[in-house]
Amino acid sequence: MYSMSKKIYYVADFFQKDEDFGGAAMSDNAFMERLRDNNDIVFEHISYKYLKPIEEDAFYIVANRSLFPRDYLKEMEKASYVIIEHDHQYDKGQPGTNGRNPYMYGPEGIVPDEFKWDLDFYRKADAVFLQTDFHKELCEKNNIEGNLISLKTTVFTKGELSLLRKVLNKDIPCVKEFGILESGVWLKGTANAVQTCQINKWEYQMIKPQPTRELFLEEIAKYATLVFIPLSPESCCRFVMEAKMLGLNIITTANYGAPLSEWFSLKGAELIDEIERLIIEESIPLIEKYLPC
C-alpha cells in the first residue's frame, strides 16, 4: 500500500450519483474503488458543474470531459495528470453532433483533423489509458500523440463481479427468444439488432431496464443468446461483457473493443475469473505506476 503525498482529483463530466447505471460512471467508480483498495487515497471530485481552481502541485485523473470548458483543460496541462479514456473524446464532432463517434466519418473510424480537439491535452498527459487494444489502436490510427497504454479491459468493482457470480449461479431458466437491449441511445444499435432478427426470422424479446442491478442482470441471464449491433466504436462495452459473464452467446459485429479482445472466447465463470485477474494483475498496476508517491 502506498501513501499519496499529493492531493488527487478525479475529473469527470458525471459521477455515479449523477447518472446511476451509466457505463462510464460505473467504470470510474470501479477505478476509484480499486485504487483506494491498494493505496491510501482520498479522491476529490471535479465535474463540469463544480469546477475547482487548478493546483499545479496536485495530481489529476481525468475521465470523460467533453462538457468541460476548454480553457480549464488547458490550465490543467500545467499540472500532473493521467487520462482514463472511456470513448473517443478527441472527436469534437461535426456541427450539430455530439462527436465521440469516429464511425460517423467512415468504416475505418478516421476523424478528419478539422473535427479533432484537445490534442495537446493527450500529448502532455503522463499517460493515456485506453480500455482495450482495439481502443488504443483506433487512437493510434487517428494520430493521437501521447503515452498510450491499453488496460486490456474495462474495470469492475469486487462487488460487481461478486454479483455477476451470484446471478450466474442462480441457473435462471432460459427463454427461447434472442435478447436485444432496449435502449433509446441510437448508437447502441437496438433498431439494427431488431432488423437482424427479423431478416433471419429469429424470435426476440427486449431486455428492459430494471430498478436494481441484480434484477437487470437476472433479466439478461434468462436469454441464451444476445444480439448486439453497436453503431459506434465502443471502447470495450460493459453490457456485452456482463452478458458473456452470465453465459450468453453473443451475435455481434467485430468492430469494437470486447469481441476483438483475447478474453472474448471465454464466458461464464471463466470470463469473470479472467477479468478479475486482468484487473488485479495488469490494469490497476499500470495506473498505479503513475500515481504520486
Image: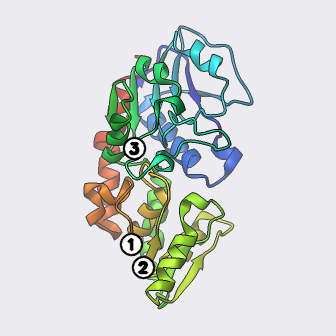
Image-quadrant location for residue 242: bottom left
Label 1: few (<14), some or many (≥20) within 10 Å? some
- The residue closer to the viewer here, 105 or 189, is 105
- Is residue 270 at all visible to an observer of this figure? yes
Q: Residue at x 50, y 44 (%)?
A: 30
The x, y position of residue 140, in whole percent, is 33, 35
Q: CA distance from mark 3 to mark 1?
A: 20 Å
- The residue closer to the viewer here, 134 or 223, is 134
Label 3: few (<14), some or many (≥20) within 10 Å? many
Of mark 3 and mark 1, the one earlier in the sequence is 3
Of mark 2 and mark 3, the one earlier in the sequence is 3
Q: Residue at x 38, y 72 (%)?
A: 250
- The residue closer to the viewer here, 138 or 265, is 138
Q: Secondary structure at mark 1?
A: strand
The x, y position of residue 125, in whole percent, is 43, 20
Q: What residue type is disc 1 on?
A: Ile
The x, y position of residue 184, in whole percent, is 66, 63
Q: Residue at x 37, y 57 (%)?
A: 255
Q: Is the Cβ of the residue at disc 1 closer than 8 Å to that at disc 2?
A: yes
Locate residue 66 relative to residue 154 in the image: left or right.
right
Q: Secondary structure at mark 2?
A: strand
Instruction: Look at the image and tell me in which quarter the C terminus lies.
Output: top left
Residue 142 vs 261, above or below: the answer is above
Single out the residue that lies furthest toward the right: 49
Please tell me the numbered disc located at residue 278. none
Q: Is the Cβ of the residue at disc 3 closer than 8 Å to that at disc 1?
A: no
Please tell me the numbered disc located at residue 250. 1
Residue 249 vs 134, above or below: the answer is below
**Residue denoted by label 3:** 131
**Residue denoted by label 2:** 225
Q: CA distance from mark 1 to mark 2?
A: 6 Å
